[in-house]
């Protein structure tokens, strides 16, 4: 997470189901913001998913919460099945400048980074990092992802 965040020079996209960032992540995001990087953070919110009982949005620093752009997948935009089950925003990745992506099973939490067994892959170059960003951007354009202020 932190290594890819540090590589961003223009844009940064972060997506995580659970968000309980620690100091290291907050410091990396604040440094990116201080370097005029446009930071976009996609999160899951309890009001959109009743299976998520709490969120760590308040674990982001005030600088991150007030400067980064936050997006969520509103409940009303989610498809449901015949049993009325609501899907989750379960993506976990970070993409720097459409050129480097870290796609992982790890949520943006201290537990995932320090204690859990997680796997992930870093993609450098090629079309995949840009395609991930294009997918998120198209979701914003279509209204599937909406901006909010935590």
Image (cartoon, grey):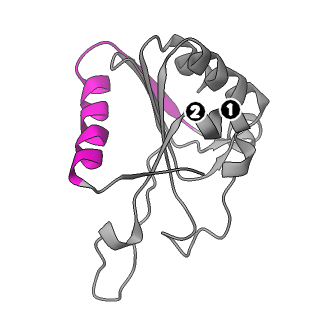
Q: Quadrant of the N terminus?
A: top right
The secondary element bearing badge 1 is classed as: helix
Q: Position of residue 21 (x, y in %)?
A: 70, 39
- 98 within the magenta span: no
The residue to which callout 2 is attached is: 67
Q: Which residues lie in the magenta part?
A: 119-142
Q: Residue at x 52, y 19 (%)?
A: 4
**For this view, does 104 lie left or right of residue 99?**
right
Picture layout, residue 67 above or below residue 35: below
**For this view, does 135 lie left or right of residue 101?**
left
Tell me whether circle 1 and circle 2 mark residues in contact (CB < 8 Å): yes
The residue to which callout 1 is attached is: 63
Picture layout, residue 63 above or below residue 34: below
In this view of the protein, can residue 116 be seen by the observer?
no
- The foreground one among 4 and 56 is 56
SS majority, magenta = helix
Picture layout, residue 15 above or below residue 50: above
Q: Position of residue 144 (x, y in %)?
A: 29, 57
Within 10 angstroms of label 1, few (less than 14), some, or many (20 or more) residues? few
- The foreground one among 79 and 33 is 33
**Whole-number angstrom distance, CA of label 1 to CA of label 2:** 6 Å
Within 10 angstroms of label 2, few (less than 14), some, or many (20 or more) residues? some
């Amino acid at each position: 997470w932190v290594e890819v965040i540090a590589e961003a020079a223009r844009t940064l996209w972060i997506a995580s189901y659970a968000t309980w960032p620690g100091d290291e992540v907050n410091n990396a995001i604040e440094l990116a913001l201080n370097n005029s990087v446009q930071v976009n953070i996609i999160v899951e919110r309890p009001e959109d998913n009743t299976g998520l009982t709490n969120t760590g949005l308040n674990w982001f620093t005030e600088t991150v919460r007030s400067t980064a752009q936050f997006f969520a997948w509103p409940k009303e935009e989610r498809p449901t099945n015949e049993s009325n089950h609501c899907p989750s925003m379960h993506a976990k990745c970070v993409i720097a400048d459409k050129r480097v992506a870290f796609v992982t099973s790890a949520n943006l939490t201290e537990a995932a980074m320090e204690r859990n067994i997680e796997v992930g892959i870093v993609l450098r170059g090629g079309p995949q990092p840009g395609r991930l960003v294009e997918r998120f951007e198209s979701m914003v354009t279509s209204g599937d992802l909406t901006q909010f202020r935590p």
